[in-house]
Amino acid sequence: MKTVAVVADRFILDVRTYIYEEITAMKKYNILVLTKRRENSHIYPFKNVYECKNKENPMKEYVNMIKKQKARLIHIKFGNDALQYIKLKRITGLPLVVSFHGYDASGALKNPWILHKYKKELFPNTDHIVTVSQKLKDNLAAAGCPSNKITVLWSGIDLEKFYYKPRTLNNGEAVRILSVARLTEAKGLKYLIEAFEKIVKIKPDIELSIVGNGPLKKELKKQISDLKLNQKVKIYDFISPHKIPDVMNDHHIFCLPSIVASNGIEEGTPNVLKEACASGMPVVATSHSGIPHVINNGKNGFLVNEKDTEQLAQSLIYLIEHSEIWESMSQWGRSHIEENFDKIKQAEKIEKIYADLIKKSKRGH
């Protein structure tokens, strides 16, 4: 079995589970992970991981491991991180794939130094680029990367872990709305809280749970308190990803009102929306970046404009008042995820990219 070296500076953050899902779904290649920091190994076990000793300059160690394990291809996660490792291609002579996941193909493009490095070093020296949404591909193409070098490949999820449960509402039961997200500007949670204040005046028998951690935690808690929503809205610290399916199945509706942040950061195609749909939740989200590929307006949820709290409130109220449509939305959502976002199927597509590049590199020698 051929070996592919995957470079990820941190392996693995709780908010980057998509990397773990991808490499554990690989069947045709042995994956060697090269990293500066091995994290959460008790949650994300993986045997073939090399953590470098020289954190400032791991190149020599990485090259030695690549040669030792006879890797045939290098795959670097995140475009901005790839800038420090682009020399791996020149030193090893191996084909190079770089994946872009969000900031690296949105906010990073506003940095003149990064943009210059992308144009002069990364785009010309990378054999293939993978993005997780069409919007990110368009951003890179506009920045000067040849479109034929870019493939849109959505991250897949574990369909066994996110088990399906159709949503129903019992008489007298409060409607429970859930949002799972890092507490950052790009997640748009302040607009969800604003919308929720409008909703609770009309539909008092509802609850909102926000699961996550991040720099805006204090600010969001203050907003909740100022709006006198402490009894209705709760923020819970980020919990283990293994517990997320059960948390989802204890709620009725999912909401993620993502926005383009003030520094230009965009989402890719948030995996948490795929997970919510797979578990059977109707979803309200924004028409942002790759989200419309996951949420089909009227089929498995509703799409609203970014920062539009009135539209967000009205869509959630409609779902709260029409629980009879939840089951059909649940079924459509689950089928859509099974067809388009199964991590096994997505891994097969990346394996095909690997195979084509390895075959092409053999012809070139």
Image (cartoon, grey):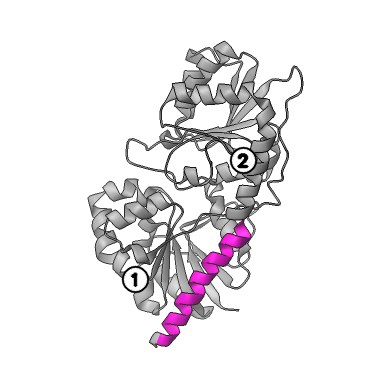
- Which stretch did the figure color magenta? 342-363
Q: Which of 356 and 231 is in front in this view?
A: 356
Q: Which of 331 and 286 is in front in this view?
A: 331
Relative side of 205 to 227, left or right: right
What's the mark number on residue 276?
A: 2
Q: Position of residue 288 (x, y in %)?
A: 43, 40
Q: Name the residue under label 1.
A: 87
Residue at x-position 45% and y-position 48%: 268
**Kind of residue at badge 2:** Ala
Residue at x-position 37% and y-position 38%: 260
| Residue 221 shows in this picture | no
| Magenta-span inclusion, residue 117 | no
| Magenta-span inclusion, residue 359 | yes
Residue 203 placement: quadrant:
top right
Task: Examine the residues drawn in magenta and state their main secondary structure.
Answer: helix
Q: Where is residue 132 in the image (x, y as percent from the top left)?
A: 46, 54
